Amino acid sequence: MEKDIFFTPEGLEKIENEIEYLKTIRRKEVAERIKVALGYGDLSENSEYDEAKNEQAQVEERIVKLESMVRNAKVIDEKDLNTEVVNVGSTVLVKDMSTGEEEEFTIVGSAEADPLDGKISNESPVGSKLIGLKVGNVTEIEIPDGFIKYEVCAINL
């Protein structure tokens, strides 16, 4: 049994749009590349054909993966969230206890994670440790460089 994959409504829409793009545009583009490559003759020495077939396989593999994610999607409903406890969908302001610096993270499902944009996975070391905490709670998290101690300062939707 596959596990639930958490999405914000926007994240699910993004995945569905990518599926639509792959099925309607990319498939046709790759099919055209294959058709053109077939016109070059001998397939045993036709690198364009091989590249196009490999690209076709990658596109189909991506479609299957995304469709599986959608089938197992659990959309986060903001009505079910509150600002009392950190959960998937929460935006959390934390303070690094050793430096005093504050950081803001939005906890999202693994498929939507984008650490450079402040979106961290609920399955990541930081995300998983923040889930369930309340304002004022402190947690110590193992990171590649050792440990970091965060205090939860605010929870927003």
Image (cartoon, rainbow, N blue to C red):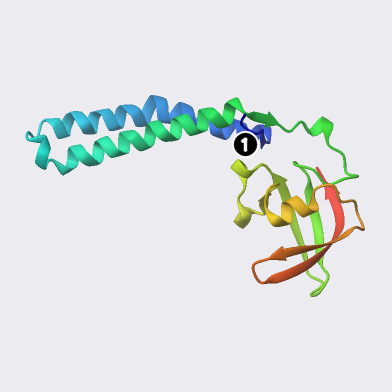
Q: Where is 141 relative to 67, above or below?
A: below
Quadrant in the rendering for residue 69: top right
Quick one: which residue is furthest to the front in this view? 1
Residue at the image point whose x is 63% and y is 44% from the top:
110
| Left or right, 26 with reference to 123 | left
Quick one: which residue is furthest to the bottom in this view? 99
Q: Where is 45 relative to 70, above or below?
A: below
Provide the secondary structure element on which disc 1 rests. Answer: helix
Whether residue 78 is visible here, answered yes or no, is: yes
Residue at the image point whose x is 41% and y is 34% from the top:
61
Q: Amino acid at mark 1?
A: Gly
Query: Which residue, given by chain and number where applicable, does mark 1 sit on?
Result: 11
Q: How many marks?
A: 1
Question: Which of the two residues, 101 or 113, is positioned nearer the viewer here?
Answer: 113
Query: Residue 26, percent across and down?
Result: 36, 32
Whether residue 16 is visible here, answered yes or no, is: no
Quick one: which residue is furthest to the left in this view? 42
Quadrant in the rendering for residue 101: bottom right
Query: Residue 15, percent across and down?
Result: 55, 33
Q: Which quadrant does the C terminus fall into? A: top right
Query: Residue 113, percent across and down?
Result: 62, 47
Residue at the image point whose x is 29% and y is 32% from the top:
30
Residue at the image point whose x is 85% and y is 49% from the top:
155
Classed neighbour count for the residue bearing mark 1: other residues with Cα under 10 Å, few (<14), some (14–19), many (≥20): some
Q: Where is 147 relative to 13, above or below?
A: below
| Left or right, 7 with reference to 58 | right
Question: Which of the two residues, 68 or 10, is positioned nearer the viewer here?
Answer: 68
Q: Which quadrant does the N terminus fall into? A: top right
Query: Residue 10, percent across and down?
Result: 64, 35
